[in-house]
Image (cartoon, grey):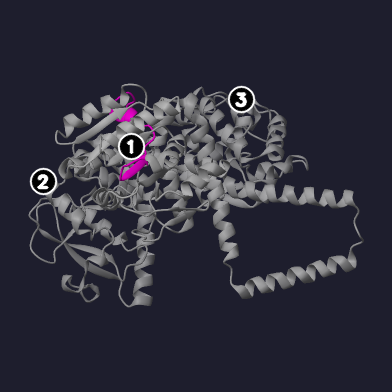
Amino acid sequence: MGNEMRTAQSVTTSSIANVDTNATKAAKSTEASSTRVPASIPTMVRAIDLMLLMLILPIWAPLLLASMTYCRLFRGQALETIYFFDGQSRVRPLYRLYQGTHLAALPSIWNLVRGDVSLIGDRLQLALTQAPDAPSRPGLINFEQLYLRMGLSFESPEAAIDGAFLSPQGYLLALVRALTMTLLAPSLLGSRHSLSLFGLKIANLSMNQLLERMLAACERQGAMERYCFVNADCMNISRDNKAYHHNLTQADLILADGLGLRLASRLKGTPLGDNLNGTDMFPLLCERLAKSGYAIYLLGGRPGIAQLTADKMQARYPALNIAGTHHGYLDSEQETAKVIAQINASKTNILLVAMGAPQQEFWLAKYQPQLNVAVGIGVGGLFDFYSERIIRAPIWVRQIGMEWIARLLAEPARMWRRYLLGNPRFLYHVLIETISIKLRRAPHSSLTQARAQAGQAALARQISTPKLDGRTQGAQLKRSAHALRLSLNRVSKRLLDILGAGILLVLLTPLLLLTALLIRLESPGAILYSQQRAGLNNKPFTMWKFRSMYQDAEARLAALKASNEMDGGVLFKMKRDPRITRIGKLIRKASIDELPQLWNVFKGEMSLVGPRPALPSEVSQYSLSDRRRLSVKPGITCIWQVSGRSDIPFDKQVLLDVDYIYQQSLWADIRLLLKTIPAVLFARGAY
């Protein structure tokens, strides 16, 4: 293998994906970590790493062998070596596939086995010069890069990494966070292009660039610059409210806030820099204003909330110049004029307006000529958080982009439409816009050819088709509109499947690992059970489940046929099936055995919502009417799953599935997914 290794001298920092080249960020990390105590990887962390490695070994080993063979045959070498410092500042070799393929890090797992690194930790420090002054805990996955990819470059990852090494629970939770961030974060970084979305130009800035621009505006003290934060809900409003859309086009900066915009940027191929919102910006802005001497004015919120926010920030930054505060209930032009006069008299530089979107944007635009401030910016519910009237989600929830879930759980009656209906609607329109743009940008030759073919087809129709009357033409238009709705529904349904299955697979990782361990401890055999099932149009596919039966379950089925408790004879169900293990009964009752099918959904073989996939032996007994179930992609849940599950006889299951086929839509799928939650919790009809 020696002739297939490269030396450290021939390796640059670009050779390894998780080395951050941002000098400012690196300096911040070094300063923050200077008080950390170097330590070897704790035993509990090593145990978790090795246990997870054993679970992925059946997939990892053949994939590594195939990748090494490919590199050897087509690139001349299989492996390369990069040298780095471990937690004890000792030089260690890191093995990677030659010339950086997408799977380049596969051989690095050997370093995990040796104990040189852990799964998550600090960024690897290359042994190109002298040993680092500050200790580190190197990991194959590092939070520093993940923070950059999630738009959190203004946060320091050291506290999160240190917390992960304190307990097994902390380490597992950190792994789940890291996997979630990896799934959601765009694969590209540092795009300099702005994001064009719904006719709006969204600036692509880092938090540091935003703060520097605000301070530069304060120094110039010219005409007021107006900035707007927008999230998925704001973008939905802009589609429905032309006045708000026009208002945003007139702003000096539109800034992207939230996971929805980051996912949209990924679909559009223009990855964003930092996740910019008023709540994260506020303390960083106050810190800089305290050093520079510029003043800030807080307008908005309920009476007393802005002043309470000011008091708390003044206590945190004693040198901060808060020019004044006022609540946001301005009921008359006279009161508004009085407040504007107070703002101008205070000689403030920056005005924060917390009235909620789009009211705050309308207010700032209307009175912009009268305001003698450098920057005016709408900040939504910021004062509620910093006055502690509303408790913000924990930092780890914000880091994985799931703060919206915390807001939904805190105020379900007010927020459910915004998040459960609004977020899918936003991504749906982003996808449609993206597809439309790609079609418009098709090569001219392809368009010309397509038009020529369309013209020939139209001419053929004119020759061979008799002239249609108005009623027939109307029927054709209706059929075309129906076909378009079906196409759009398929696209939105697939988008929901990818997002839903991907997020659930990451969030449920601890539960999946625990279930796998319990299955293995109770009985010998494979953890997962695979079966050939009938997919869309009866196309067979391999469906995965957690094994809930003993190994000889199939062999014992023939002897139990007479005890079948399911009417119709097509399906086999027994409430006290002797083939089911003790763990199997538990995971069946809670529907945990079905969770591996999220992978089938992610791959596109199944959907989150649809008729349950049937066995080929069951399909062979279907009547012609029953076969209607095969006209759509099978799913994890459907109408009969939320209406009694196994208690419903087969013929009624078919009727409910057919009913779903004819009424399916994005909103119907979301409603059925929400109804599935209580059905699972109360285990109705599950055995």
Q: Mark 2 packing: few (<14 Cα in 10 Å), some, or many (20+)? A: few
Q: Amino acid at mark 3?
A: Gly
| Residue 375 drawn in magenta | yes
* Residue where numbered disc 1 is placed: 352
Look at the image and say whether residue 49 sits in the magenta stretch: no
**Range drawn in magenta:** 371-393
Q: Secondary structure at mark 3?
A: loop
Question: Do the CB atoms of the residues marked 2 and 3 lie less than 8 Å apart?
Answer: no
User: To which residue does mark 2 refer?
Assistant: 39
Describe residue 166's horizontal placement relative to residue 61 as left or right.
left
Residue at mark 1 to residue at mark 2: CA–CA distance = 45 Å
Q: Is residue 597 above or below residue 139?
A: above
Measured as percent of width and height from the top left, residue 305 is found at 31, 24
**Relative to 501, is 441 above or below?**
below
- What residue is pinned by disc 3? 644
Horizontally, residue 657 falls left or right of residue 295, namely: right
